[in-house]
Image: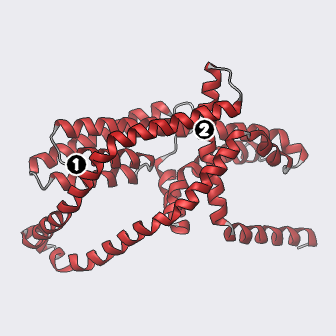
Amino acid sequence: MDNKNLLLILTLLLLGILTWQLRWALMILFGAIVIAVALDVLIQRLQKIVPLPRPLALSFVVSSLILIGFFVFKLLVPELIIQIDELGSLFPTLINKFNSLITTDERFSNLSIAEKFNWGDIQPFGAKLLDFAGGAANSVLQLILISLLALLIALDPSPHRRIVISATPLRARKGMDELLDDFRLALGGWLTGMTISALSIFVLTWIGLSLLNAPLALLSSLVCGLLTFIPTIGPTAATLLPLGVAILSSPTLMFQVLILRVVLQNFEAFILTPLLLRRTVNLLPTVALMSQLSLGILLGLPGVLIALPLAVVLQVSAQKILVTQIMNEWR
């Protein structure tokens, strides 16, 4: 091995160590870029309607989002607080019902589940989980930092773009410019499509649960809508809340809620999301799941949140660089 290759390997190792040490700062930066891309999509659509300067367009977009958030907060939060209180009162009943089912049903007894399953062991874990959720409130400062960075990037993205292009070798700068356009198009399209999909699932689930007179319809629908942003795992996990609440009312309602969620999940997975993302990047379920698992293990909950946007960027990079420029040119 000559000195040039050795120096290259050492440089890559040092960059890898530095990246790992700065992973939280890089995660905040990437989150800010994702939000900035979402704002940029709204700004450009507004500028197509009204030719406003970018700072004024950004101010209008942010003010509109704040007003919409305020009205939604005022409309939904009081009812959500009531339903969260109801969930807190129903939770011990739900645990006791499942515990009774496991300990008395002969089918579970034959499988020896009743002996192995002990709610006393689960409840301390649940308490730790609640403590973790309470400690997550300390991340408000990080969210503020991400928001400020996103506003600065969205206010004038050109200098940041020039920095990335300037750091690229001269012969590759044109390709990097095109790659950044592809990143923006794919990430913006994915964010738009997933937002519309999540809102649709929230509204349809709310209507369906309300028609079925299911308890905690608004809270359950909100959870289902939010977890739509996490394909494969999210919709399945979101179904547990309305099912668990419905089983306290009657088995009939439980089956009705299950059928509703299965229909909506299939509608979202096979019709709505592919239709919304047909012009951008539609992640394969295996890619989405592996990215969530990998970053979840490395970074915890924040890793799960940034896994899918990062997978979109990596998928575009693989297509434009690995496939087009390397594999297709391999002799």
Q: Give the number of marks.
A: 2
Spatial distance from mark 2 to mark 1, Cα to Cα? 33 Å
Earlier in the chain: of badge 2 and badge 1, it is 2
**Figure check: 15 above or below 72:** below
For the point 50% across and 64% down, the residue is 296
- Closer-to-camera residue (109/195): 195
Quadrant in which residue 131 is drawn: bottom left
Quick check: marks 2 and 1 in contact, CB under 8 Å? no
Residue where numbered disc 2 is placed: 39
Image coordinates of residue 277 in percent, x first then y, are: 51, 34
Neighbours of disc 1 within 10 Å: few (<14), some (14-19), many (20+): many
Task: Tell me the SS state at disc 2.
Answer: helix
Q: Which mark is residue 216?
A: 1
For the point 68% across and 21% down, the residue is 51
**Figure check: 98 above or below 148:** below
In the visual, does 236 lie left or right of 173?
Answer: left
**Figure check: 96 above or below 27:** below
Image coordinates of residue 185 in percent, x first then y, are: 64, 35
